[in-house]
Image: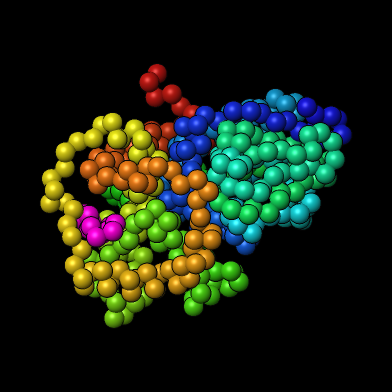
Amino acid sequence: MSGAQHPRLILHQFLSPHECKELEFIHKSCSTVGYRPNVFSTTLTHLIATNSAHLLMPFVPIRERLKEKVEEFFGCEYELFVEFTGLISWTKGASIGWHSDDNRPYLKQRDFAAVCYLNSYNNDFKGGLFHFQDGEPTTVVPLGGDVVIYTADSRNIHSVDEISDGERLTLTLWFSRDSSHDEDAKLINLLSENLLHNNVPYSCLPLPASTNMYWFSLDQASNEQLGFDICWARMHVLGFDMLYSQDKSCHPNKSELLMEPLRLARGDKLFDQEFVNILHALQVVQHYWWRASELQTARVKMESSRVVELTQLQHARISSLKSLFLRDQHLVEKVFSRVTCKSDQQNFDWADFATSISVWEDYVSQLHKEILMSLPDWKALQSIFRISFDAK
Ligand SMILES: O=C(O)CCC(=O)C(=O)O
Ligand SMILES: [Fe+2]
């Protein structure tokens, strides 16, 4: 699979379907507009900065297993540091030409790359094939769970075809021999500040970053007049509308609104529960989407009073909010179109949704407990690693 000339490794089904889905949930709830056109990203520092440090936990065992694989394959045990970890998604129009991953002066510390595919060619997106310029294999077809590992230098020049439909999602890591580029040390510092000093008591509710990080526009100039807010857009493509608890339509200030409490609506119905801000609502919705199929079997009765009819006035407010946050609805459909429309969209049920909120609360508080228990050992060893809590 590798030659001395082109050191590379392809692993099939390295990540489980559950791991892929969990990381997809994190990305779809937390991503920001990325560094290149039609690209979205979720970095670990961003998760910490938006009060979602606990969402680092699902990455921990995966990072560890990947680092072990890379070290073993390239024969550099205990020599590598993770330089960068991020979820990166590409939508229609995104592509990258021939390049090596260390091809900029500020990227010279990168020694190895690991790209994990979290969803699949043709199922979730069209286009987006990966090619190596020389050596075998020439083409890698991205399939959820598979990983491509290669040296970041010119022995592994590669490219990715343009995405023509859907959203292609990867977990991408770079590794370095240079300890001054150790991501763990930086993350541990941030975690110590965020988890131990700030928020007392710490809440697991996300806090939005600045508005421009969520504003997508084709010219990348954060054009206020065109484009859309990606949090609103991700809700919209799943069929949800949002309504602020107080009417803000006279003085619409986008950055203030992102921090305001809101409620969710769907069709003619309003779900009568307040979420602290758009990211909270988005996370709950994405979590429901991730777990909808399990939840349908566990359906419980919900008081009917939690879902009410939308009034005419509320309908009107929803449309004016949409014209503010989804200026270019046509572009929203283009960017976040779903290749296969899963049947769960038709099966939507508010009772399942209500159940999923308490499942989500248990999920985040468990992750929060785990990160708090891990941090002292991480600090002591200046390294992020998996700790088995059962043994303690
Ligand atoms: O997503 C991929 O398959 C590779 C992406 C890539 O080449 C890069 O981010 O440098
Ligand atoms: Fe690359």
Given residues 255 and 67, the one toward you in this image is 255
- Image coords of residue 119 (percent x, y): 56, 40
Given residues 115 and 344, the one toward you in this image is 344
- Whether residue 109 is visible here, answered yes or no, is no
- Whether residue 119 is visible here, answered yes or no, is yes
Residue found at x 36% / y 55%: 239
The prevailing secondary structure element of the residues shown in magenta is strand
Residue found at x 35% / y 49%: 285
Which colour scheme appears in the figure?
A: rainbow
Question: Does the magenta portion include 2?
Answer: no
Locate the C terminus and report the quarter of the image it occupies: top left
The part of the chain drawn in magenta is: 263-274
Report the residue that reaches farthest toward the bottom.
Answer: 250
Given residues 9 and 160, the one toward you in this image is 160
- Image coords of residue 98 (percent x, y): 79, 51
Residue 3, image quadrant: top right
Q: Is residue 334 above or below residue 13?
A: below
- Image coords of residue 246 (percent x, y): 22, 70
Residue found at x 46% / y 61%: 230
Q: Is residue 196 above or below residue 256?
A: above
Instruction: Classify residue 323 as left or right of residue 381.
Output: left
- Image coords of residue 362 (percent x, y): 29, 37
Q: What count of labels does the image hold?
A: 0
